[in-house]
Image (cartoon, helix red, strand yellow):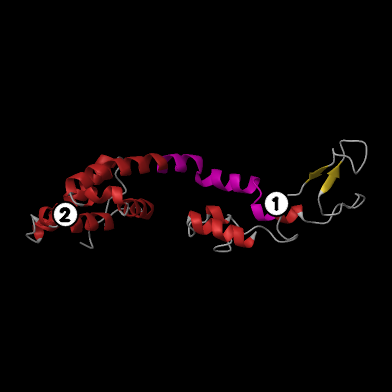
């Protein structure tokens, strides 16, 4: 079964899934195991999942199959293949949209024109320009009433920020490109706990 692999050169989901099934059946025929999908459907589904390409599709399918609502999907190869066709089709639509928006030359130009979060954050905490008045880093007071003690005084800019000079980073993995809520390694509850702890 190690030689079993989904062809990524075929243009549509139906062709990719049918080619995978054909290759799977050829391997079973060569081993004289024609009844294997009927006798061991869960294992047959596992072999087919292991053969999926590209890795992003494979990981998505395996993750979805772990959910309790897909228990019946793993018990029948026919049900699994019908379900897989829709997943591969959705993946191909998503993949083609990504390729169109981030072409080889377009992605580099887009990355050069857009400053990264790290450079934006570091520029935010640099010293003021020459000739400009230095502003104390704290909440700004804006009086709406007649004096500083009036009821119209409001706090502005009371939002907490990270230590000046330090760019924002993920509390889970330390990556500067995303926050803890976007981290692929942290679950939603873990991200919330890490955020509350490090805030």
Please give the residue where the numbered disc 1 appears in the rendered image: 120
- Give how far across and how far down residue 32 sits, in percent: 6, 59
**Left or right for 196, reference 58:** right
> As drawn, is 146 to the left or to the right of 43?
right
Residue 110 marker: none
Name the quarter where the C terminus is drawn.
bottom right
From the top left corner, tell me how far across and down residue 133 is, in percent.
91, 50
Mark 2 crowdedness (10 Å alpha carbons): few <14, some 14-19, many ≥20? some
Q: Is residue 99 magenta?
A: yes
Secondary structure under badge 2?
helix
Rendering quarter of residue 41: bottom left
Compared across the picture, whether 168 is left or right of 20 comes to: right
For the record, the magenta segment spans 95-119
Q: Say whether disc 2 or disc 1 marks the residue closer to the N-terminus.
A: 2
In-front residue for pair 172/13:
172
Task: Between residue 106 and residue 67, name the one nearer to us.
Answer: 67
Q: CA distance from mark 2 to mark 1?
A: 53 Å
Q: Judging from the image, what secondary structure is the residue with disc 1 in?
A: helix
Residue at screen point 57% across, 48% down: 108
- Measured as percent of width and height from the top left, residue 175 is found at 58, 61
**Which residue is disc 2 drawn over?**
41
Nearer to us: label 2 or label 1 = 2
The x and y percentages for residue 190 are 51, 59
Q: Quadrant of the N terminus?
A: bottom left
- On screen, residue 19 above or below 193: above
């Amino acid at each position: 079964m190690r030689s079993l692999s989904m062809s990524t050169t075929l243009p549509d989901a139906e062709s990719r899934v049918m080619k995978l099934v054909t290759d799977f059946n050829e391997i079973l025929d060569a081993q004289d195991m024609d009844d294997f999908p009927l006798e061991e459907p869960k294992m047959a589904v596992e072999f087919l999942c292991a053969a999926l390409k590209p890795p992003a599709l494979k990981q998505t399918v395996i993750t979805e199959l772990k959910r309790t609502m897909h228990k019946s999907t793993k018990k029948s190869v026919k049900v699994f293949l019908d379900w897989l066709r829709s997943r591969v089709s959705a993946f191909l639509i998503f993949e083609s949209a990504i390729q169109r928006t981030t072409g080889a030359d377009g992605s580099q130009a887009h990355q050069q024109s857009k400053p990264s979060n790290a450079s934006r954050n570091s520029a935010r905490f640099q010293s003021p320009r020459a000739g400009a008045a230095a502003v104390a880093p704290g909440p700004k007071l804006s009086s709406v009433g007649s004096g500083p003690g009036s009821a119209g005084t409001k706090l502005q800019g009371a939002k907490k920020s990270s230590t000046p000079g330090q760019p924002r980073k993920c509390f889970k993995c330390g990556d500067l490109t995303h926050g803890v809520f976007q981290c692929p390694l942290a679950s939603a509850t873990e991200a919330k706990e890490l955020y509350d702890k490090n805030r």
